[in-house]
Image (spheres, rainbow, N blue to C red):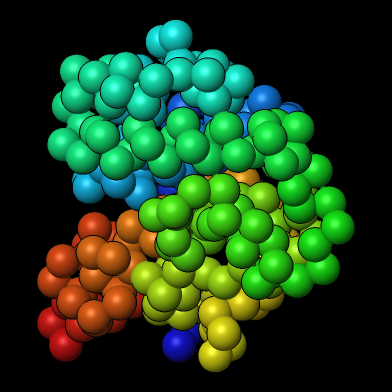
Amino acid sequence: MAATAFDMPRLVSLLAPHPATELQLDLETTPGRADWWSVAIVLAGAGPEPRGLQASRRLLEQEFSSPASLARADPANVAAALEALGEARALPVAARLVQSQRNLQERWGGSLEALGTDCDELEELGSRLASLCPGIGASTVLRFLRPLRAVFGAAEATPLLAAAGAAARHLGWGEADDAGAPDALLHHWRQAGEPVAFRDLEAALERLGSRACLRERPQRCPLEAACPLRPAAGA
């Protein structure tokens, strides 16, 4: 399929950047990555992403803002805070937040970097993260790792979400392989001069793919006339 004229910055502007960018988390730092782990858990249990972002933003502003404070917290108190923020599944989300941080403190000194430092394969790294608390599944782990491919060596193979892969393919920005590897999209992004953060591009593609590309529903595409699947006017 021919590449579309719809560029990467415009796509991110239209469909919003990565949640970590929206929450102003610096993923280049240890505290930023620690906060992102908590946010990934909240987003996994929050239903619609805007609600999860709102709950995450407010939680990071409250007394449970740091991983250490979550590790010391009573899950019931965290659940009460989440309920006040409109989180419908507050108790299980709170339990996962607290237990995962406690286990991270006990097993790895509270350091995600220590947890991942000697992992050679994505499966091993993902298994360690999931083992921090029952109920943390593959989708949460992969959500956490996608923007951190350059941080953890074992995370380089973290696949694109199927929706992002479908959107990238339709836009002519790279064909993912059978395992959903991001290599082709990364190559196209670099050739374009890395005009946006890769995590922001990937998040925008996920939203686009979920709305239209994954099931080839061009009538729902937010790109409107720029959608490469829509027939040209007058065709």
Residue furthest to the top: 63
Query: Across the whole image, how many numbered discs are drawn on residues?
Result: 0
- Taking the spot 53% from the left edge, 40% from the top edge, the residue there is 100
- Taking the spot 13% from the left edge, 82% from the top edge, the residue there is 234
Report whether 136 appears left or right of 109. Answer: left
- Please tell me in which quadrant of the rendered image residue 192 appears: bottom right
How far from the left and from the top, in percent, is residue 9? Answer: 50, 47
Report whether 26 appears left or right of 71. Answer: right
Of residue 177 and residue 88, the one placed in the foreground of this image is 88
In the displayed structure, 29 sits above or below 40; it is above
- Please tell me in which quadrant of the rendered image residue 213 appears: bottom left
Q: Quick check: can you spot residue 116?
A: yes
In the displayed structure, 54 sits above or below 39; it is above
- Please tell me in which quadrant of the rendered image residue 125 appears: bottom right
Report whether 13 appears left or right of 155. Answer: left
Q: Quick check: can you spot residue 226?
A: no
Quadrant where the N terminus is found in the figure: bottom left
